[in-house]
Amino acid sequence: MPFDANSVARAVALIDEGFSQRYVARKLGVARTTLRDAVKRFQETGSYERRPGQGRKRCTSARDDRLLVI
């Protein structure tokens, strides 16, 4: 399950209810560090969304993608 904005919102709500980050991470099936970083990002920005530029960088170009389809 991807850790999207809805999952972050659920995590923040559970933590606000008093559940530990360890419990919430286990319940949602994500690593504790992933949860910690997402909660910290929410506290800093007030947004559940990921920041632009996060995530794995592309390994192929648009041209490579076209050639792979052929």
Image: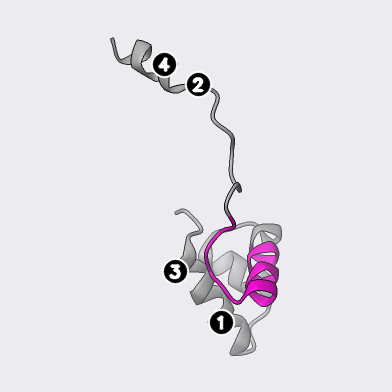
Give me the residue at 71% from left, 59% from top: 33
Asked if residue 6 is among those painted magenta in the image, a careful observer would answer no
For the residues marked 2 and 4, what is the alpha-carbon distance in whole angstroms? 8 Å
Q: Which mark is residue 6?
A: 3
| Circle 2/circle 4 CB separation < 8 Å | no
Classify 52 as above or below 20. Answer: above
Give me the residue at 59% from left, 44% from top: 55
Between disc 3 and disc 4, the foreground one is: 4
Q: Which residue is mark 1?
A: 14
Give me the residue at 30% from left, 15% from top: 69
- Label 2: few (<14), some or many (≥20) within 10 Å? few
Q: Which residue is mark 2?
A: 60
- Label 4: few (<14), some or many (≥20) within 10 Å? few
Which secondary structure, mark 3?
helix
For the residues marked 1 and 3, what is the alpha-carbon distance in whole angstroms? 12 Å
Tell me the kind of residue under disc 4.
Arg
Segment colored magenta: 35-51
> Quadrant of residue 70 in the image?
top left
Q: Earlier in the sequence, mark 3 or mark 2?
A: 3
Q: Secondary structure of the magenta portion, mostly?
A: helix
Q: Which mark is residue 42?
A: none
Q: Which residue is mark 4?
A: 63
For the residues marked 1 and 2, what is the alpha-carbon distance in whole angstroms? 39 Å
Tell me the kind of residue under disc 3.
Asn
Between disc 1 and disc 4, the foreground one is: 4
- Seen as rendered, the residue at the extreme bottom is 17
Using the image as rendered, state which of residue 52 and residue 31 is in the foreground: 52
> Quadrant of residue 42 in the image?
bottom right
Using the image as rendered, state which of residue 64 and residue 22 is in the foreground: 64
Quarter of the image with the N terminus in it: bottom left
